[in-house]
Structure formats: structure tokens, C-alpha cells
Amino acid sequence: MNILLLGYGKMGKTIEKTALERGHHIAGRITIDNVADLDQLQTADVDVVIEFSSPESAVANLTYCFERGWPVVCGTTGWLNHRADLEDLCREKNGAFFYASNYSIGVNLFFKLNKTLAQFMRNYPSYQVSMTEIHHTEKKDAPSGTAITLAEGVMQHLPAKRRWVVNEPGNEPLVVAQDAIEIESLREGVVPGTHTVRYDSAVDRIEISHVAHSREGFALGAVIAAEWIAGREGIFGMNDLLNFNDE
Ligand SMILES: NC(=O)C1=CN([C@@H]2O[C@H](COP(=O)(O)OP(=O)(O)OC[C@H]3O[C@@H](n4cnc5c(N)ncnc54)[C@H](OP(=O)(O)O)[C@@H]3O)[C@@H](O)[C@H]2O)C=CC1
Ligand SMILES: O=C(O)C1=N[C@H](C(=O)O)C[C@H](O)C1
């Protein structure tokens, strides 16, 4: 396949390596400095776009791809307040759009485990749920997209929790209302991504964690999603790719 890398930073470069190993061709590498090169590409030069850029640029990038009729696999986080409008545009253009806050297969198993645990904890209100996410210091958004997906998974199964609140890097501890899930965001060194969900009672703690050792798991999932979306039309996510139900 001819893959256009829209965003060629830490993730774009890791995805390029994985895509080449899997026999794909790179149709272009776009950064903030050469966005104008997009107009030079012929529509048929690109089979699928993999978009990992920045929260500020994702909406314009996705709009551009839908206008050109290119299927898009997007991993950029921090822009989801525009998600409904972009999905409408994709449908209007009969396009194909794949989004995941995290493309790692392990994290998607962890999402399932998180929901199962939340379902179980529903009968034990003496336990208070909270989360911590740790990422490298260059990360622009907080909380991480993955932490938001985890919080949504908990809210789906613990009706007492209706919202999440973020404690951003460097802040004092928050006083958290009973209906809220606290997400603590920490930024340290070059950490690729660590997520912990914990349930604390007065006497003990239950904790589950996912620790990414590198970016390779994210990249592999994104390339597999690009292979999967080819020839499809519609709005997709990891549950479709992995044949998971949404429970
Ligand atoms: N869903 C998932 O599994 C994962 C998601 N992510 C998310 O992916 C995104 C990118 O992460 P990462 O690669 O670490 O970030 P980097 O900052 O390393 O790279 C971002 C890239 O996007 C480019 N860029 C910025 N603005 C534009 C624009 N307008 N058009 C095209 N390219 C642009 C930057 O260009 P320049 O270098 O010139 O500034 C850079 O090449 C983040 O939102 C992150 O949260 C990350 C890992 C996994
Ligand atoms: O910015 C990152 O690096 C990551 N971003 C994603 C997120 O916000 O959840 C996924 C992964 O944790 C790495």
C-alpha cells in the first residue's frame, strides 16, 4: 500500500519503520514545515493516510483528507471535541475514518480488563476509583487520550461516576467530588506511556497497569488498522478491528 504519513515526529518515524518492514511504500512524509506539499500529491498516489500530528492540527488535516477522498487512520489525541463534526463530514464524503486513542493491542486488552473490573466493583462502593497516566515531557495534551478512554469505560459500568477531572502536571492534590474520577497526569523523561487504574478503600488497594516499553506497539496497531481499512467505507475503531463487542 502507498501510505501517506501526516505528521512525521516520534510516531510518524516509528510507523514508517513498521510500514516498510510490512512491505508498504511511503507516499509522503508531512511535517508542519511542508504541509503545502500535500497539494502536489495526486489523489491516486495515496491508498491510506496515517495521521499522528498535534492536537492543534488534527482537525484541519482530517478535513483535508476527507475532501480528497483518502481513507484515514488517526492517532492524534486532544482534538475530540470536534469528533462528531468530522465524522459527519466523513459520512457526507462517503469516506473511511479509523480513530483510536491507543493503537496498542495490549492497551485494548487493558481497556477490556478495565471495564470488567469496573463492572465487578459496582457492588463495592467503599472503593474509590482513580487513575494515573505517565508520559514523556514533550506530550502536549493532558490527560492522555488513553486515560479518557479508560475513564469512559469506568463510567459505562459505575453509574455513580459521571465525569472525570484532571490533575495536571505540577499541581497540588485535588479535592475530588464523589461523582468524579480523578486522573493524575505526570510528565517524566522519555516515558512512552504508562496507565494505572486503582480502587482504594480505607484498608487496601486494587490496581491494574499497562506499561508501554516503546512506541512500537502503537505503530504496529496503526499499520494493521491501515491495512484493514483499505477498501472499506465508514467510521471505525479498535473494537471493529479486534472483533471486540463494546461491553
Ligand atoms: N493513538 C495512539 O496510539 C498514539 C497517539 N499518539 C498521539 O499522536 C500525536 C503525535 O505524537 P508524537 O509523534 O509523539 O508527536 P511529535 O511531536 O513527535 O510529532 C508530531 C508531528 O506532527 C507534525 N505536525 C505538527 N503540525 C502539523 C501539521 N499542521 N500538519 C502536519 N504535521 C504537523 C510535527 O511537525 P514538526 O516536527 O515540524 O513540528 C511532527 O512531525 C499526539 O497527539 C500523541 O498524543 C502518540 C502515540 C500513540
Ligand atoms: O503522546 C503520546 O506519546 C501518547 N499518546 C496517546 C494518548 O494520549 O493516550 C497514546 C499513548 O499513551 C502515547
Image: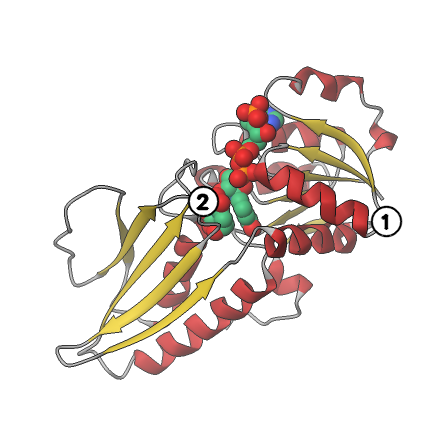
Please name the residue that numbered disc 1 is placed on.
23
Pointer 2 with pointer 1, Cβ within 8 A: no
Q: Is residue 177 left or right of residue 116?
A: left
Q: Position of residue 199 (x, y in %)?
A: 26, 73
Q: Pick the residue in front: 247 or 11.
A: 11
Q: Label 1: how many residues lie within 10 Å, few (<14), some (14-19) or many (20+)?
A: few
Residue at 87% x, 31% y: name it. Answer: 44
Secondary structure at numbered mark 2: loop
Vertically, is 138 above or below 184?
above
Question: Is ligand 1 within 8 Å of the beta carbon of the residue shown at mark 1?
Answer: no
Marking on residue 232: none
Residue at 83% x, 50% y: name it. Answer: 231
Please name the residue that numbered disc 2 is placed on.
190
Tell me which amino acid carries mark 2: Val
Residue at 73% x, 18% y: name it. Answer: 37
Work out whether mark 2 precedes mark 1 in sequence or the reverse, and give the earlier one. 1
Quick one: quadrant of the N terminus?
top right
Q: Pick the residue in front: 217 or 84.
A: 217
Q: Residue 175's image quarter?
A: bottom left
Q: Position of residue 3 (x, y in %)?
A: 78, 39
Q: Is residue 28 left or right of residue 117?
A: right
Q: Assign ligand 1 to one image quadrant.
A: top right
Tell me which amino acid carries mark 1: Gly
Residue 222 visible to an observer of this rendering: yes
Count of marks, rendered view:
2
2 vs 1, front mark = 2
Q: What's the distance in space between the residues labelled 2 and 1, CA to CA?
A: 29 Å
Residue 85 visible to an observer of this rendering: no
